[in-house]
């Protein structure tokens, strides 16, 4: 997407000249255990090695509310509207103060989730779709969005490898699907995947089968990114630079 083609999903941020946003916004979506962190690390190494400056953003990283959000989630008592507004505030702060300035400077912004994950969480919890779209209408349309789809059963296995207990929120325990956390996790993640599938056409996701090895997934993602960068390249050296390969040390 060239700067002249950029757009907001709805209400634009005041004072933002879209023609000045010459960088690229690439989003990786997916549940915990889908491999987002691994993919983002591999992409960053690849792009850094090819000479592209990168900036990382992601959910709950705003200096304005991230700490308060994590502290509130620890008690597992947040109301649904409060949680929604926490995430929307976190997103808006990062968009204005990190993402847009980085794009203006020509950086590639790698987003560990964007507006789609909190939107899906809200919808699964019964929020009004129009209200959900409205609070994220300031979102800037990314250049590419990859949704890492992993079967719930494999997600369970990966999450158990990282922790002895499934996360309260990622299991949807507040939704009341089941008193058993394993059963709730399976049901909740199935609902989440359905919502992502419903949103795919509206938001242009590239759905990636992330049941496969990280390197196989990464190759597929890189093909799409390389195609985009080559189409928009102003320099003949860019395609050669993209032949850089990540180190063998990145796994999992």
Image (cartoon, grey):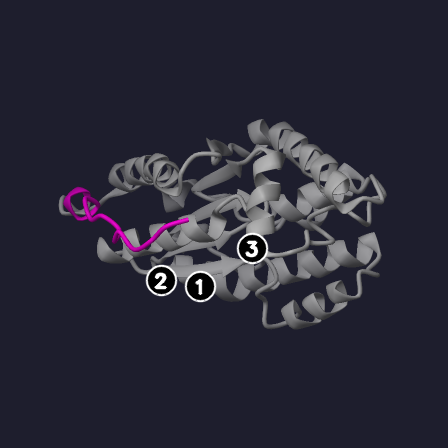
Image coordinates for residue 36, horizontal then vertical, percent: 48, 48
Cα separation between marks 1 and 2: 6 Å
* Label 1: element kind: helix
Residue 69 coordinates in the image, percent (x, y): 70, 66
Q: Main secondary structure of the magenta part?
A: loop
Q: Position of residue 158 (x, y in %)?
A: 55, 46
| Bounds of the magenta segment | 239-252
Answer with left or right where residue 86 lies relative to residue 38: right
Look at 34% across and 41% down and name the residue there.
215
235 magenta-colored: no
In terms of sequence position, does the residue under pointer 2 or pointer 3 come before the other?
2
Closest to the observer, 212 or 148: 212
Residue 162, which numbered label? 3
Residue at disc 3, secondary structure: helix
Q: Residues within 10 Å of mark 2 (few under 14, many from 20)?
A: few
- x, y percentage for residue 6? 45, 44
Q: CA distance from mark 3 to mark 1?
A: 35 Å
Q: Nearer the viewer, residue 152 or 54?
A: 152
* Mark 1, residue position: 101
Judging by the rendered image, the residue that carries numbered circle 2 is 105
Does the rendering let one see residue 9? no
């Amino acid at each position: 997407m060239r700067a002249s083609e950029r757009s907001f999903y709805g209400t634009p941020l005041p004072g933002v000249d879209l023609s000045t946003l010459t960088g690229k916004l690439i989003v990786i979506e997916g549940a915990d255990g889908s491999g987002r962190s691994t993919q983002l690390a591999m992409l960053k190494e690849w792009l850094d090695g090819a000479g592209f400056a990168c900036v990382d953003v992601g959910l709950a990283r705003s200096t304005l509310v991230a700490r308060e959000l994590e502290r509130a989630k620890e008690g597992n008592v947040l109301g649904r509207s409060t949680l929604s507004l926490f995430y929307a505030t976190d997103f808006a702060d990062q968009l204005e103060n990190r993402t847009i300035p980085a794009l203006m400077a020509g950086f590639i912004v790698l987003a560990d989730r964007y507006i789609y994950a909190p939107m899906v969480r809200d919808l699964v919890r019964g929020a009004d779709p129009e209200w959900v779209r409205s609070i994220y209408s300031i979102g800037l349309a990314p250049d590419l969005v990859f949704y890492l789809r992993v079967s719930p059963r494999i997600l369970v296995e990966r999450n158990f490898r990282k922790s002895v207990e499934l996360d309260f929120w990622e299991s949807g325990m507040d939704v009341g699907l089941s008193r058993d956390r394993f059963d709730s996790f399976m049901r909740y993640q199935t609902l989440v995947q359905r919502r992502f599938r419903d949103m795919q056409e509206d938001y242009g996701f590239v759905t990636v089968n992330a049941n496969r090895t990280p390197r196989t997934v990464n190759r597929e993602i890189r093909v799409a990114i390389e195609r985009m960068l080559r189409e928009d390249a102003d320099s003949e050296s860019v395609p050669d630079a993209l032949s850089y390969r990540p180190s063998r040390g990145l796994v999992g």
